[in-house]
Image (spheres, rainbow, N blue to C red):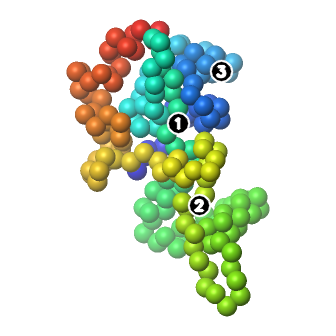
Amino acid sequence: MPRPLGELEDAVMTRVWKWNRPVTVREVLEDLQQERSIAYTTVMTVLDNLHQKGWVRREAEGRAYRYEAVSTRAAYAAALMNEAWSRSDNPAAALVAFFGMMSAEQREALSDAMRIVQGPVTQGQPTQGQGPENLTGPANPGSSENLTPPENPAGSENPGGPENSGGPENPRGPENPDDPENPGDAEHRAER
């Protein structure tokens, strides 16, 4: 289960999700600099950490990388809600309390989502759930592959979350100095 993103991670991921295309450190930096003072190396480190945690994938382009979201913001939000709900000792009461906090717009969005999941109902037939696999996120319309947030590798129990497991694309873990994904390597220095 993913941990909530930190404030700077969220600011970076917001741009990656919003732009819905592979992005460079420079593009994210220039946009972030409109609202705060921040160094290129800071943005590069945040994107590298997000890559190690499994939130973005990257492809080399010359001496730099282009980063792309692995899942959608909707999948991230859903995973956080599911985690919070699953920790409740009374899930029904937690849902009732959550629904009570919702605005009219949020309740309408919930109703719309329930109609999508339940599918068409014909008189005399029980409701047939279509499941979340038929929902699509903005990162890849028409596809459900982006609805699954990063998880711990193959059933491992890792209380520290995906950032301590090395993420799905880096099973050896970020602490391995011989790892080509290690942020201290020459590839990362060359990106600056």
**Circle 2: element type:** helix
95 to 8, vertically: above or below:
below
Q: Amino acid at mark 1?
A: Ala
Tell me where residue 112 appears, x and y as whole percent: 71, 64
Tell me what residue is drawn at x 70 percent, y 83 percent: 122
192 to 131, vertically: above or below:
above
Q: Amino acid at mark 2?
A: Asn
Report the disc number at residue 31.
3
Which mark sits nearer the N-terminus, 1 or 2? 1
Tell me what residue is drawn at x 47 percent, y 9 percent: 192
Tell me where residue 191 appears, x and y as whole percent: 45, 11
Report the disc number at residue 69.
1
Report the disc number at residue 134.
2
Tell me what residue is drawn at x 47 percent, y 48 percent: 149
Report the disc number at residue 189.
none
For mark 2, does the 10 Å Cα neighbourhood hold few (<14), some (14 to 19), or many (20 or more) residues? some
